[in-house]
Image (cartoon, rainbow, N blue to C red):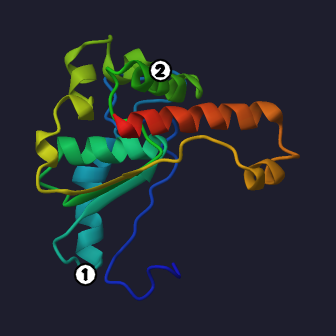
C-alpha cells in the first residue's frame, strides 16, 4: 500500500489459488476441487472491479513462483485483456523438462493431479498452457521476467543458519529451476 499509495493504480491480489496455476482445470480434483481461476480473473473479477473502481483502460497481471507462470499464461491466452505482465521466479513452459517437473511438483505438492488440470501430457489443454511454445500473443506487450540464480552468499547463509536444512535445499533447487525457466 505504501509503495503504490500515490500511483494511479489499483492492485488486486487474489489468494487461495493453491497449486491451481491460475488455470481453468479440465476436471474436478478430489484434493483441490475444480479450479476455474482463469475464468474468475478474466471474466468475473475484472468487470466487478471496474464497476466500482475508476478504470483507466489498462490492465497488467503479475505473480511470483506459481503465480508468475499463471500471469504469463493469462496474458498469453487473453491478450486482448492485458497490456503488461510481470513474472518473478516462475516457469513458463510445461513442455520443457524443468518446466514440466516444476508444474508437476507444484500441483502434486498440494495433493493434486496434473491430469485433472490439463489432461494427459501433450493433450490440447497441455499445449494451450505452454506459454513459451507460442509467444505471438505477447507481441507489443510490456513483459518483465526476473529470477535469482539460487546461489547462497555469506549474508544468505547467516540469515538461514537456523532454518531447517531441507527447506533451504528445496528453496535453492526451486530458485535454480525458475532461473533456468526464466532464461529459456
Image height check: is 35 above or below 83? above
Q: Quadrant of residue 184?
A: top left
Residue 54 - label: 1
Disc 1 crowd, CA 10 A, few/some/many (<14, 14-19, 20+) = few
Which residue in the structure is indicated by mark 2? 101
Depth check, front residue: 117 or 63: 63
The earlier-in-sequence mark between 1 and 2 is: 1
Residue 33: give x, y in percent of width and height.
Answer: 47, 29
Query: Is residue 66 toward the left or the right of residue 166 in the image?
Result: left
* 65 lies above or below 115: below
Evaluate if marks 1 and 2 touch, with contact meaning CB atoms under 8 Å apart.
no
- The single residue placed furthest to the front in the displayed view is 154
Instruction: Determine whether, in the image, residue 142 is placed left or right of residue 88.
Output: left
Q: Quadrant of residue 164?
A: top right
Residue at (37, 38) in percent of width and height: 183
Name the secondary structure under disc 1.
loop
Estimate the x, y position of residue 112 in percent, counting from the top left: 51, 23
| Rendering coords of residue 15 (x, y %) | 50, 52
Of residues 168 and 31, which is closer to you in this image?
168
In three-dimensional space, the C-alpha distance between marks 1 and 2, rounded to whole angstroms, equals: 41 Å
* For residue 31, side relative to residue 47 (left or right): right
Q: Which residue occupies 34% across, 24% down?
A: 94
Residue 22 visible in the picture: no
Determine the image quadrant of residue 159.
Answer: bottom right
Amino acid at each position: 500500500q505504501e509503495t503504490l499509495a500515490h500511483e494511479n493504480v489499483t492492485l488486486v491480489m487474489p489468494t487461495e489459488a493453491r497449486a491451481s496455476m491460475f488455470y481453468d482445470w479440465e476436471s474436478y480434483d478430489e484434493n483441490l476441487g475444480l479450479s476455474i481461476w482463469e475464468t474468475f480473473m478474466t471474466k468475473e473479477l475484472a468487470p466487478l472491479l471496474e464497476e466500482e473502481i475508476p478504470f483507466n483502460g489498462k490492465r497488467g497481471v503479475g505473480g511470483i513462483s506459481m503465480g508468475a507462470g499463471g500471469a504469463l499464461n493469462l496474458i498469453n491466452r487473453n491478450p486482448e485483456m492485458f497490456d503488461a505482465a510481470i513474472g518473478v521466479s516462475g516457469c513458463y513452459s510445461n513442455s520443457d523438462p524443468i518446466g514440466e517437473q516444476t508444474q508437476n511438483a507444484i500441483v502434486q505438492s498440494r495433493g493434486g493431479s496434473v491430469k485433472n488440470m490439463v489432461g494427459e501430457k501433450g493433450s490440447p489443454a497441455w499445449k494451450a498452457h505452454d506459454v513459451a511454445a507460442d509467444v505471438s500473443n505477447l507481441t507489443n506487450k510490456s513483459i518483465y521476467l526476473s529470477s535469482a540464480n539460487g546461489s547462497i552468499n555469506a549474508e544468505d547463509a547467516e540469515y538461514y543458519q537456523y532454518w531447517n536444512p531441507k527447506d533451504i535445499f528445496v528453496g535453492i533447487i526451486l530458485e535454480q529451476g525458475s532461473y533456468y525457466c526464466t532464461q529459456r
